Image: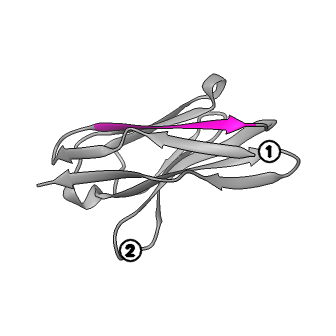
Amino acid sequence: QVQLVESGGGSVQAGGSLRLSCAASGSFFSINTMGWYRQAPGKQRELVATITSGGLTNYADSVQGRFAISRDNAKNTVYLQMNSLKPEDTALYYCNAEVRTTYLGRYWGQGTQVTVSS
Protein backbone atom coordinates (compact mmCIF):
# COMPACT_ATOMS: atom_id res chain seq x y z
CA GLN A 1 0.00 0.00 0.00
CA VAL A 2 1.32 3.43 -0.97
CA GLN A 3 0.56 6.51 1.09
CA LEU A 4 1.19 10.17 0.33
CA VAL A 5 1.16 12.50 3.31
CA GLU A 6 1.13 16.26 2.79
CA SER A 7 2.11 18.96 5.25
CA GLY A 8 2.82 22.68 5.31
CA GLY A 9 -0.51 24.24 4.48
CA GLY A 10 -1.94 27.13 6.43
CA SER A 11 -3.16 30.70 6.31
CA VAL A 12 -1.09 33.61 5.05
CA GLN A 13 -1.60 37.16 3.87
CA ALA A 14 -1.26 38.10 0.23
CA GLY A 15 2.37 38.41 -0.74
CA GLY A 16 3.46 35.81 1.77
CA SER A 17 5.04 32.40 1.32
CA LEU A 18 4.35 28.80 2.24
CA ARG A 19 6.17 25.55 1.60
CA LEU A 20 4.28 22.31 1.10
CA SER A 21 5.81 18.88 1.52
CA CYS A 22 4.57 15.47 0.49
CA ALA A 23 6.24 12.23 1.52
CA ALA A 24 5.53 8.86 -0.06
CA SER A 25 5.70 5.74 2.07
CA GLY A 26 4.90 2.07 1.71
CA SER A 27 6.17 -0.73 -0.48
CA PHE A 28 7.08 0.23 -4.04
CA PHE A 29 9.90 -0.02 -6.58
CA SER A 30 10.10 3.55 -7.83
CA ILE A 31 8.31 6.86 -8.21
CA ASN A 32 8.04 8.54 -11.58
CA THR A 33 6.39 11.95 -11.92
CA MET A 34 5.27 13.72 -8.77
CA GLY A 35 3.11 16.80 -8.70
CA TRP A 36 0.78 19.18 -6.99
CA TYR A 37 -2.83 19.89 -7.90
CA ARG A 38 -5.35 22.21 -6.27
CA GLN A 39 -9.08 22.55 -6.01
CA ALA A 40 -10.87 25.72 -4.97
CA PRO A 41 -14.51 25.65 -3.80
CA GLY A 42 -16.86 25.25 -6.72
CA LYS A 43 -14.05 24.64 -9.19
CA GLN A 44 -12.46 21.62 -10.80
CA ARG A 45 -9.14 20.25 -9.63
CA GLU A 46 -6.30 21.77 -11.64
CA LEU A 47 -2.63 21.09 -12.15
CA VAL A 48 -0.21 23.36 -10.30
CA ALA A 49 3.18 21.82 -11.05
CA THR A 50 4.85 18.50 -11.82
CA ILE A 51 8.38 17.18 -11.66
CA THR A 52 9.81 14.03 -13.21
CA SER A 53 12.23 11.69 -11.49
CA GLY A 54 14.96 13.36 -13.54
CA GLY A 55 14.01 16.85 -12.39
CA LEU A 56 12.10 18.18 -15.39
CA THR A 57 9.41 20.59 -14.23
CA ASN A 58 6.13 21.89 -15.59
CA TYR A 59 4.01 24.71 -14.18
CA ALA A 60 0.55 26.12 -14.67
CA ASP A 61 0.69 29.58 -16.24
CA SER A 62 -1.00 31.04 -13.17
CA VAL A 63 1.89 30.08 -10.85
CA GLN A 64 4.87 30.32 -13.22
CA GLY A 65 7.55 32.48 -11.65
CA ARG A 66 5.97 32.40 -8.17
CA PHE A 67 5.98 28.69 -7.28
CA ALA A 68 8.87 26.24 -7.40
CA ILE A 69 8.54 22.45 -7.29
CA SER A 70 11.41 20.24 -6.20
CA ARG A 71 11.95 16.71 -4.95
CA ASP A 72 14.32 14.64 -2.87
CA ASN A 73 14.38 11.20 -4.44
CA ALA A 74 16.27 9.70 -1.49
CA LYS A 75 13.42 10.77 0.81
CA ASN A 76 10.61 10.08 -1.69
CA THR A 77 9.44 13.61 -1.02
CA VAL A 78 8.20 16.43 -3.22
CA TYR A 79 8.06 20.08 -2.21
CA LEU A 80 6.20 23.13 -3.42
CA GLN A 81 7.64 26.52 -2.50
CA MET A 82 4.92 29.13 -2.95
CA ASN A 83 5.94 32.78 -3.00
CA SER A 84 4.02 35.99 -3.70
CA LEU A 85 0.81 34.24 -2.80
CA LYS A 86 -2.47 35.71 -4.01
CA PRO A 87 -6.03 35.25 -2.70
CA GLU A 88 -6.81 33.29 -5.86
CA ASP A 89 -4.25 30.69 -4.75
CA THR A 90 -6.62 29.71 -1.94
CA ALA A 91 -7.49 26.03 -2.41
CA LEU A 92 -7.06 22.52 -1.14
CA TYR A 93 -3.69 21.34 -2.45
CA TYR A 94 -3.21 17.68 -3.32
CA CYS A 95 -0.02 15.74 -3.86
CA ASN A 96 0.04 13.20 -6.69
CA ALA A 97 2.58 10.56 -7.67
CA GLU A 98 3.02 7.86 -10.28
CA VAL A 99 4.27 4.90 -8.27
CA ARG A 100 5.47 1.56 -9.56
CA THR A 101 4.57 -1.40 -7.41
CA THR A 102 3.57 -4.52 -9.33
CA TYR A 103 1.95 -2.06 -11.72
CA LEU A 104 2.19 1.68 -12.40
CA GLY A 105 -0.49 3.54 -10.48
CA ARG A 106 -1.38 7.14 -9.59
CA TYR A 107 -1.82 7.96 -5.96
CA TRP A 108 -3.22 11.01 -4.19
CA GLY A 109 -2.64 12.56 -0.81
CA GLN A 110 -5.45 13.67 1.46
CA GLY A 111 -4.97 17.36 0.71
CA THR A 112 -3.72 20.34 2.67
CA GLN A 113 -5.54 23.65 2.87
CA VAL A 114 -3.89 26.89 1.73
CA THR A 115 -5.75 30.10 2.51
CA VAL A 116 -4.50 33.49 1.33
CA SER A 117 -6.18 36.60 2.68
CA SER A 118 -6.08 40.02 1.07
Q: Earlier in the sequence, mark 1 or mark 2?
A: 2
The question of residue 20 being in magenta is answered with yes
Residue at 16% x, 43% y is 15
The mark total stands at: 2
27 relative to 47, above or below: above
Q: Amino acid at mark 1?
A: Arg
- Residue 88 position within the rendered picture, expressed as x and y whole percent measured from the top left: 25, 61
Chief secondary structure of the magenta span? strand
For the C terminus, the quadrant is bottom left
Please name whichever residue, 27 or 59, is drawn nearer the observer in this view of the structure. Answer: 27
For the record, the magenta segment spans: 18-26
Q: Quadrant of residue 26?
A: top right
Does residue 19 appear to the left or right of 102 in the view shown?
left
Disc 2 residue crowd, few under 14, some 14–19, many 20+, Cα 10 Å? few
The amino acid marked with disc number 2 is Lys
Kind of element beneath mark 1: strand
The Cα–Cα distance between marks 1 and 2, rounded to whole angstroms, is 30 Å
Dot 2 falls on a residue whose secondary structure is loop
Q: Which residue is mark 2?
A: 43
Would residue 24 appear left or right of 59 to someone viewing this image?
A: right
Residue 20's place in the image compared with 108, above or below, is above
| Residue at 29% from the left image edge and 56% from the top image edge | 89
Asked if the magenta segment contains residue 79, the reply would be no
Q: Is residue 38 above or below residue 44?
A: above
Most foreground residue, 9 or 48: 9
In the depicted structure, whether residue 104 falls above or below residue 70: below
Residue indicated by mark 1: 100
Q: Residue at x 53, y 36 (%)?
A: 78
| Residue density around tag 1, few if under 14, some if 14–19, many if 20 or more, within 10 Å | some
